[in-house]
Amino acid sequence: MDTTWRSIANRISEATGTPFIVKSHDAVGGGCINSTTVLEDGRRRFFVKLNDAGRLAMFEAEAEGLKEITQSRSVRVPQPVCAGTVGDSAYLVLEHLELSGADGRCFEQLGRELAQMHRATQKQFGWRLDNTIGSTPQINTPDTDWVQFWREHRLGFQLDLAARHGRNLMRQGERLMADLGEFFRRYQPTPSLLHGDLWGGNVSAAGERPVIFDPAVYYGDREADLAMTELFGGFSSRFYQAYQEAWPLEAGYKVRKTLYNLYHVLNHFNLFGGGYGSQAERMMEALLGELR
């Protein structure tokens, strides 16, 4: 791999305008999708993600998503340095941050800053790039109709994948998608800038500031981000209180959050199998029950 690190170091030198020669490369934990390494020259460190060369577009979209969040002047994210391929590998180089667990005060700040991020809006739902949710393609073709966007590019896409993976959920899924508009009769979301994959594993702290990373950026209903924070837990009550004070959620969120988290549970089934399929069925039954 020495040739790989030398090639990446040359790209870092070009991108930063300062020579970078690798003195050490240490593998670190970075999730189940990519392999991750910290490169160091004795003075500077960079965080590097590696995957198959065919995954370059995934890394490029991630870098653009981090830039999009940065432009909102809200929550801190690691800054992308460069991306490319070397041999049979694709890579993404990011600013290295010394991360630690977020405490209550940090979560409170995150609540305020996330509300600020969500106030970055555009005219259509979706985004200018497709990206990934985990390693699953996430289609972001812009649409002015949120119900149609969620039906086609979120639930419908995942239900089709589930059928290919041997779990036909279409009987419930088609009923749910046909009546999807019922959940939005009294609520019209704004296309807000979303992290898109906001679970506890993608939140940390750098010094006293909260940091979010590994985004699956698009513009959608801000409730979708809030819903995912509740899916696996880990966010303090101070986070939710601070968000509500900055931008209160509207009536009906407790029902809609199940609709939004269904997307992630279906995706987990498509990635990992197991009990996520049964969980998705239960969630769809609960949502259909709300329509009766």
Image (tube, helix red, strand yellow):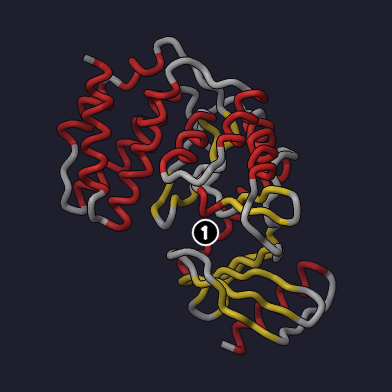
Quadrant housing residue 244: top right
| Image location of residue 200, percent across then percent down | 51, 49
In the rendered image, the residue lying farthest to the top is: 186
Crowdedness near tag 1: few (<14), some (14–19) or many (≥20) residues, C-alpha within 10 Å: some
Residue at image position (55%, 34%) is 219
Q: Is 70 rendered above or below residue 144?
A: below
Quadrant housing residue 105: top right
Residue at image position (56%, 68%) is 49
Q: Nearer the viewer, residue 200 or 95?
A: 200
Q: Is 104 rendered above or below residue 23?
A: above
In the rendered image, the residue lying farthest to the right is: 18
Q: Nearer the viewer, residue 286 or 191?
A: 286
Q: Nearer the viewer, residue 125 or 97?
A: 97
| Image location of residue 276, percent across then percent down | 27, 48
Image quarter of the N terminus: bottom right
Badge 1 marks a residue whose secondary structure is helix
Q: Is residue 126 left or right of residue 148?
A: right
Q: Is residue 108 left or right of residue 292?
A: right
Residue at image position (20%, 25%) is 175
| Image location of residue 246, percent across then percent down | 67, 25
Residue type for callout 1: Ala
The residue tagged 1 is 57
